[in-house]
Amino acid sequence: MRPISILTVGILVVLILACQSPLLKAQSVPNSPAMSVSISNGVTSVSILLQASQNLTSQDRFFSLPQFNGQLVGQNASTVSSIVQDSVRTLSPHASVSNLRLGLSSSPPTNGTVLQWFNVSLQFQVGGIQTPENGNERTDLSWKSFVIASNITIGGIEVNTVGSTYMQAAATYLQALEAPSQGTFAFRNLINNRVVTAIGLPSAILRIQLLNFTRFLPQVDTWQQSYNFTSRSATWSFTADPNLGLVVQQTSNEPHVTEKVTSGFFYVLKATISAPARSIARGDTILAFFQDTSEALMGTVIVAILALGSATYLYERRTLKSRSTRKPKH
């Protein structure tokens, strides 16, 4: 029998190992997620960047957000860290928060013709949610939809309850502006993507809280799964409802005028979770395979090919030797 070539054996090994990997749809991950969660061995890192903006000053010239640029770290961030941990523990009782850093970067007030930015950043690590399993790890992510109801300040500037802190006077102004039912303009108001009447604006504006992630409640295994070739990781992504914050749409009641002017306070919630390449999501739990990277697979392929090559070489040598020792027939 003719021995199998080493190349054929190598190809078969590669195909077998490839078939053992789950099929992941290759596609791009949404840009600039508000919440990024990265799972590594024993550590779950969270990075939150809320990029809010406003042009409401075009309607109410007295409205603006405070300008500030600074961070809270270390001991200065201990109070905020405790608040975040308490919020996270309402969903994952054994979770602990560490290495928290809070930042705010806001631009100067404008006249509303250009956006004023109000960017809030929050980074921390979550422990107590990992469970070892045969050299791999189960990570509980049910805490991802946490909400902070209390005030969070940095340098005396509120970064969470912006609706009640900064926008109530503007809501009262809009209520009076929109009151005439037969005025020159018609208005449509949305708060967190829900229609609100003019009379309900001052109370509904209280619902604008930046550190409210309840929209991430759907379980991770229902999120959009993909593969990031750059970081060689499995990713799950989710985009919440658009038009979060306050949206005021103004149209003219004049005939043949169709122009619509939009003003308000805007932000978007997106989330991305990343884990090692062959990780699996089951509900809100990620089963992460830390010992099964592409490098490990390639190493397995190389070792298998070398082992099978050596076996083939020994087989061929013994076959040739046995043939050479046979006596020719007379």
Image (cartoon, rainbow, N blue to C red):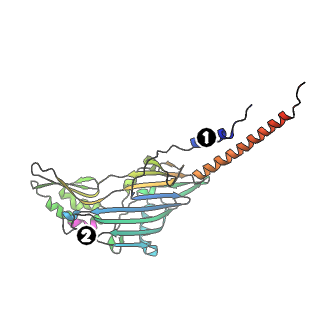
Q: CA distance from mark 1 to mark 2?
A: 61 Å
Q: Residue furthest right?
A: 330
Q: Residue furthest top?
A: 330
Disc 2 residue crowd, few under 14, some 14–19, many 20+, Cα 10 Å: some
Q: Amino acid at mark 2?
A: Pro
Instruction: Tell me the SS state at disc 1.
Output: helix
The one of 297 and 272 positioned closer to us in this rendering: 297
**What residue appears at the point 36 percent right and 62 percent down from the top-left corner?**
50
Q: Are marks 1 and 2 in contact (CB under 8 Å)?
A: no
Q: Which residues are magenta?
A: 164-169
Q: Is residue 83 visible?
A: yes
Q: Is 79 displayed left or right of 208 in the figure?
A: right
User: What residue does disc 2 label?
Assistant: 109
- 59 in magenta: no
Q: Amino acid at mark 1?
A: Ile
Disc 1 residue crowd, few under 14, some 14–19, many 20+, Cα 10 Å: few
Q: Position of residue 229 (x, y in %)?
A: 49, 51
**What residue appears at the point 40 percent right and 53 percent down from the top-left corner?**
30
Quadrant where the image shows the N terminus: top right
User: Is the magenta region chiefly helix, strand or loop?
Assistant: helix
Q: Position of residue 300 (x, y in %)?
A: 64, 48
Q: Is 70 displayed left or right of 286 in the figure?
A: left
Q: Is 272 displayed left or right of 327 in the figure?
A: left
Q: Position of residue 3 (x, y in %)?
A: 72, 35
Quadrant in which residue 132 is drawn? bottom right
Q: Say which label, 1 or 2, has the lower sequence index.
A: 1
| Image: 109 above or below 15 | below
Give the number of the disc on residue 16.
1
Q: Is residue 91 visible?
A: no
